[in-house]
Image (cartoon, rainbow, N blue to C red):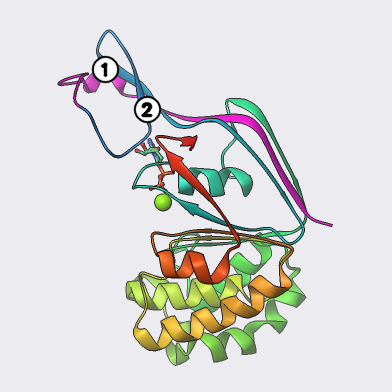
């Protein structure tokens, strides 16, 4: 049984060279982004999530929507354990896999093959399991000889293919997907959506952050809207 439980979490990004930035106008109304906390008109931190409570159980398919900077990626990364909240608690039960767009997690100097092993192991596979998944990844990514080349030679769409193929090489209990359908050509979009379908069916919990109403409708059964880091 998988479970994701967030209890009143807040996540902040500290701005280390804060003195370098001063706010031009505190009163400018902005449509995007989290709340910027300022002291004496100098920026101290960005509050990316504020007081977010969320409970997900087996069978939940959640769509995360909201404008740029509303906190969708931060929320997914916090569930994945990449960020720690400054307040509140995060409990996650179940094996998590993530597809975080545009080459996230890829090492540009390593070859495609080395990245496959590295990423698979980061997602919890043993080396033997990672190696066993290679034929499937070769097949799905259609990158051919490029898999032997450093990933820095890939286009955005090619990185996406590799990322997606690795992330979906084994079935996770909890699948987190962040805005991935922007990159990749039309043929890949179709293929990726087909594979997603399979995945979403098998995963216990699925969360998709997307600006596409069509994808949210297709893959999720519940929606949460974020605004300036808070759930509306
Ligand atoms: N590495 C970072 N350092 C500072 N602020 C960040 C960083 N990443 C995101 N933010 C800020 O956190 C807020 C939420 O961003 P994000 O979670 O990426 O939103 P979304 O995915 O909804 O576009 C935004 O105000 C953004 O400026
Ligand atoms: Mg984002």
In the image, 31 versus 82, the foreground residue is 31
> What secondary structure is marked by label 2?
strand
Can you tell which quarter of the image residue 8 is in?
top right
Please report contact status of discs 1 and 2: CB closer than 8 Å, yes or no. no
Residue 9 on image: x %, y %: 60, 30
- Label of residue 35 in the image: 2
Residue displayed at 75% across by 76% down: 129
Is 166 included in the stretch rendered in magenta?
no
Gap between marks 1 and 2 measured at Cα: 18 Å
Judge the density around disc 2: few (<14), some (14-19), many (≥20) Cα neighbours within 10 Å.
Answer: many
In the image, 56 versus 137, the foreground residue is 56
Residue displayed at 34% across by 47% down: 68
Can you tell which quarter of the image residue 127 is in?
bottom right
- Can you identify the residue that label 1 sits on? 19
Residue displayed at 64% across by 71% down: 200
Residue displayed at 73% across by 62% down: 59
Q: What stretch is highlighted in magenta?
A: 1-28
- Label of residue 135 in the image: none
Residue 167 on image: x %, y %: 59, 70
Q: In the orientation shown, which residue stands out farthest toward the top?
A: 40
């Amino acid at each position: 049984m998988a479970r994701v439980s967030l209890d009143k979490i807040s996540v902040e990004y500290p701005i280390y060279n804060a003195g370098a930035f001063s706010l031009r106008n505190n009163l400018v109304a902005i449509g995007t982004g989290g709340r910027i906390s300022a002291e004496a008109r100098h920026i101290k931190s960005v509050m990316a999530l504020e007081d977010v409570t969320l409970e997900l159980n087996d069978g939940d398919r959640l769509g995360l929507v909201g404008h740029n900077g509303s906190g969708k990626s931060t929320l997914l990364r916090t569930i994945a354990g990449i960020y720690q909240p400054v307040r509140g608690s995060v409990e996650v039960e179940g094996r998590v896999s993530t597809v975080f767009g545009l080459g996230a997690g890829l090492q540009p100097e390593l070859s495609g093959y080395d990245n496959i092993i590295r990423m698979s192991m980061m997602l919890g596979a043993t080396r033997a399991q990672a190696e066993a998944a290679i034929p499937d990844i070769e097949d799905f990514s259609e990158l051919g000889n490029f898999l032997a080349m450093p990933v820095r030679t890939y286009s955005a769409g090619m990185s996406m293919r590799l990322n997606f193929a690795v992330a979906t090489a084994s079935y996770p209990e909890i699948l987190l997907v962040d805005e991935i359908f922007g990159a990749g050509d039309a043929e890949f979009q179709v293929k990726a959506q087909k594979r997603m379908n399979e995945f979403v069916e098998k995963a216990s919990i699925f969360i998709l952050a997307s600006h596409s109403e069509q994808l949210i409708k297709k893959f999720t059964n519940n929606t949460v809207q974020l605004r300036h880091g808070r759930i509306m």
